[in-house]
Image: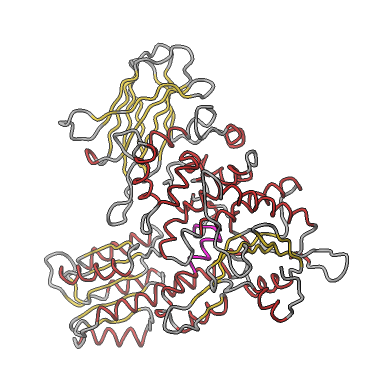
């Protein structure tokens, strides 16, 4: 299971409930903070950053009141705040006014001046906007989680040699011994294979064995798909097999 | 880790030692003939035989009462494969094509003495073989297995000492359990340390929790369901005798008391007594001692009170931050000079009109001579709620002496 941290900033109650429901359904273990104004949203961002527990994803209404009672206007302060924090997080900006001149200008400006592949627009006028949103979230969040785990477990001088039963929980890093961390990595890779970007899939193939022979179903991912001795004994039957 | 190196290492293991239920693949660092395997090879077969003996002992244990486990899942060879090669720490993996577990154990050890190396090897083999047995009920590939990770590790560490009494290799994880304050029992950061909770449950109930749990139950949910039926006690309850607070948390303070299920004088000799949050002495009619704290779910804090001579009676009040909705529990126990436990008193809620949730107790029969101190054990009996949220709660303790 993966625990992600979300911030939703949305002043329209029905949309807020819909977004919260989507996240809870697709990311059931996750923590969700909710704000209705830009000021509250910025405060959540600052607190999370100062506590060292930044958000994994922000879902922002493009038009927000600064404070309760204010008129909702295009707000770009939250995405700027997220960028300033320096933490890699996905920023989904939702709007029903994608043709609004101010929004268009903001998007053009950010794409040209500070392109950010982790920032994208969700046009609520599209009938499948929620599916697209959840799809992007899955791709980004599970992909990043897998790459982090791969680096922690298999990177230079990493966990596979240094952890396992002997790992000292006070030494920092993510919890869990090698047995379950490896199992979790394989399980998440299998479960979310179809959500992952091509380069993430390739990284997994580089590190683990992936059986995609049954293309209609999920692949099987493991450190070993089978005992390497089987292959060895097939090529050399006299070689010490039991 | 370099997976390719791991696979290459496995392929180079040229010797097979087969026992009744395991196939151990290994190689020699310095064979009499041919190429040596360097760090992938064992110095001699003593280590391998130690592994084999421990694996088979665990197998016998798990397939007999009170565990009564079925034979574990096995692959092509009908036995569990064990690789012995150059990994610093062992693990249990799975052959994904066959959905059968395998074990990887180290070919060498950094323990400073041969005795320590063999003790560790024996414990590690037991530990990994427990994962192999547990795998049958909760295969790694199933999403819900993640919820059982901490209980799987706790069982594996517990069985090290159950199968090998006197082998204290698991003490290497226990310093944190002794020193840290108020860590939730099911926190993944202390999954090895939860072995003491499993010890408190005992083998029957611990095994029933694993084996009789329903597919989508968490360990805590299984405990809530099974504890009343199997033990006649709630698992964790602020107002009733329960396993977690009145049982385990209290018991684990008195590690030097023979009557404690978690009796472990060697652990105390090695690391000292469990950490207390605060201590204070108090005289008759002196100003009250005040302790404050905040406690995560399924965690406990200890406070010590040293009554001066002439104190006949203590009054202890706990004021929980959550008021009448509190899930906190406080119990007071007499600790004698040899650290065995005396009378235990539970702080009780006042009449219903008392809406602040405070609980209190009068300890009016303090031993006049043999008393060492009084320990106040505060526990948070909150379990995961419907939204999957765990709650922390603050509290204040007031102690007055008369």
Is the C terminus of chain A in the top left, top right, bottom left or bottom right quadrant? bottom right
> Is residue A147 located in the magenta-colored stretch of the structure?
no
At 72% from the left and 49% from the top, the residue drawn is B118
Residue B75, picture quadrant: bottom right
Frontmost residue, A84 versus A63: A63
Is the N terminus of chain A in the top left, top right, bottom left or bottom right quadrant? bottom left
Frontmost residue, B262 versus B55: B55
Q: What segment is highlighted magenta in the picture?
A: A175-185
Compared with B238, A155 (above or below) is: below
| Colour treatment of the image | secondary structure
At 29% from the left and 78% from the top, the residue drawn is A133
Compared with B195, A84 (above or below) is: below
Instruction: List x then y, in percent, for residue A77.
Output: 27, 73
Residue A132, picture quadrant: bottom left
Majority secondary structure of magenta residues: helix
At 73% from the left and 61% from the top, the residue drawn is B17
Instruction: List x then y, in percent, for residue B246.
Output: 38, 33
At 44% from the left and 47% from the top, the residue drawn is B208
Instruction: List x then y, in percent, for residue B39.
Output: 75, 64
Frontmost residue, B344 versus B225: B225
- Is B291 displayed left or right of A99 in the figure? right
> Is residue A184 located in the magenta-colored stretch of the structure?
yes
Compared with B260, A69 (above or below) is: below
Frontmost residue, B43 versus B368: B43
Compared with B336, B20 (above or below) is: below
């Amino acid at each position: 299971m993966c625990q992600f941290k979300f911030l939703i900033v949305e002043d329209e109650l029905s949309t807020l409930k819909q977004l919260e429901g989507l996240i809870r359904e697709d990311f059931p273990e996750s923590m969700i903070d909710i704000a209705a104004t830009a000021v509250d949203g910025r405060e959540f961002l600052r607190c999370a950053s100062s506590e060292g527990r930044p958000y994994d994803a922000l879902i922002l209404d493009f038009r927000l009141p600064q404070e309760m009672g204010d008129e909702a206007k295009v707000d770009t302060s939250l995405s700027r705040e997220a960028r300033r924090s320096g933490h890699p997080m996905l920023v989904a900006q939702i709007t029903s006014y994608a043709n609004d001149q101010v929004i268009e200008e903001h998007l053009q400006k950010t794409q040209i001046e500070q392109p950010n592949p982790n920032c994208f627009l969700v046009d609520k006028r599209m009938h499948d906007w929620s599916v697209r949103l959840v799809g992007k979230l899955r791709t980004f969040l599970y992909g990043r989680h897998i790459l982090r785990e791969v680096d922690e477990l298999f990177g230079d001088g990493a966990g596979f040699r240094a952890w396992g039963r002997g790992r000292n929980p006070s030494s920092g890093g993510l919890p869990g011994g090698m047995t379950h961390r490896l199992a979790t990595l394989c399980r998440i890779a299998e479960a979310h294979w179809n959500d992952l970007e091509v380069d993430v899939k390739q990284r997994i193939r580089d590190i683990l064995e992936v059986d995609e022979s049954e293309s209609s179903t999920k692949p099987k991912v493991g450190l070993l798909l089978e005992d390497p001795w089987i292959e060895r004994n097939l090529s050399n039957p006299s070689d010490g097999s039991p | 880790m370099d997976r390719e190196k791991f696979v290459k290492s496995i392929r180079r293991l040229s010797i097979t030692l087969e026992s009744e239920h395991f196939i151990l693949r290994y190689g020699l660092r310095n064979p009499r003939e041919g190429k040596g395997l360097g760090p992938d090879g064992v110095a001699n077969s003593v280590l391998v035989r130690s592994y084999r003996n421990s694996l088979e002992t665990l197998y016998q244990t798990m397939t007999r009462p009170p565990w009564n486990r079925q034979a574990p899942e096995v692959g092509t060879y009908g036995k569990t494969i064990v690789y012995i090669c150059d990994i610093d720490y062992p693990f249990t993996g799975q052959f994904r094509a066959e959905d059968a577990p395998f074990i990887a154990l180290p070919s060498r050890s950094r323990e400073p003495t041969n005795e320590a190396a063999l003790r560790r090897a024996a414990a590690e083999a037991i530990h990994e073989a427990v994962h192999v047995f547990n795998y049958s009920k909760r295969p790694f590939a199933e999403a819900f297995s993640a919820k059982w990770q901490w209980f799987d590790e706790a069982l594996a560490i517990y069985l090290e000492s159950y199968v090998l009494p006197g082998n204290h290799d698991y003490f290497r994880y226990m310093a944190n359990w002794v020193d840290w304050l108020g860590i939730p029992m099911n926190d993944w950061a202390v999954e090895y340390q939860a072995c003491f909770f499993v010890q408190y449950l005992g083998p029957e109930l611990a095994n029933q929790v694993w084996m009789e749990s329903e597919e989508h139950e968490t360990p805590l949910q299984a405990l809530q369901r099974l504890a009343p039926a199997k033990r006649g006690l709630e698992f964790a309850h602020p107002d009733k005798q329960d396993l977690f607070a009145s049982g385990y948390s209290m018991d684990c303070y008195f590690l030097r008391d023979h009557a404690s299920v978690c009796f472990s004088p060697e652990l105390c000799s090695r690391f000292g007594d469990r950490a207390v949050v605060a201590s204070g002495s108090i005289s008759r009619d002196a100003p009250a001692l005040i302790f404050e704290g905040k406690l995560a779910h399924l965690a406990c804090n200890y406070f010590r009170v040293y009554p001066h001579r002439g104190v006949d009676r203590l009054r202890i009040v706990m004021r929980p931050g959550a008021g009448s909705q509190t899930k906190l529990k406080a119990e007071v126990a007499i600790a004698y000079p040899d650290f065995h436990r005396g009378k235990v008193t539970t702080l009780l809620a006042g009449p219903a009109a008392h809406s602040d949730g405070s609980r209190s107790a009068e300890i009016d029969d303090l031993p006049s001579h043999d008393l060492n101190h009084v320990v106040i054990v505060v526990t948070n009996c909150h379990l995961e709620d419907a939204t999957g949220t765990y709650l922390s709660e603050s509290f204040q303790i007031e102690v007055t002496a008369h």
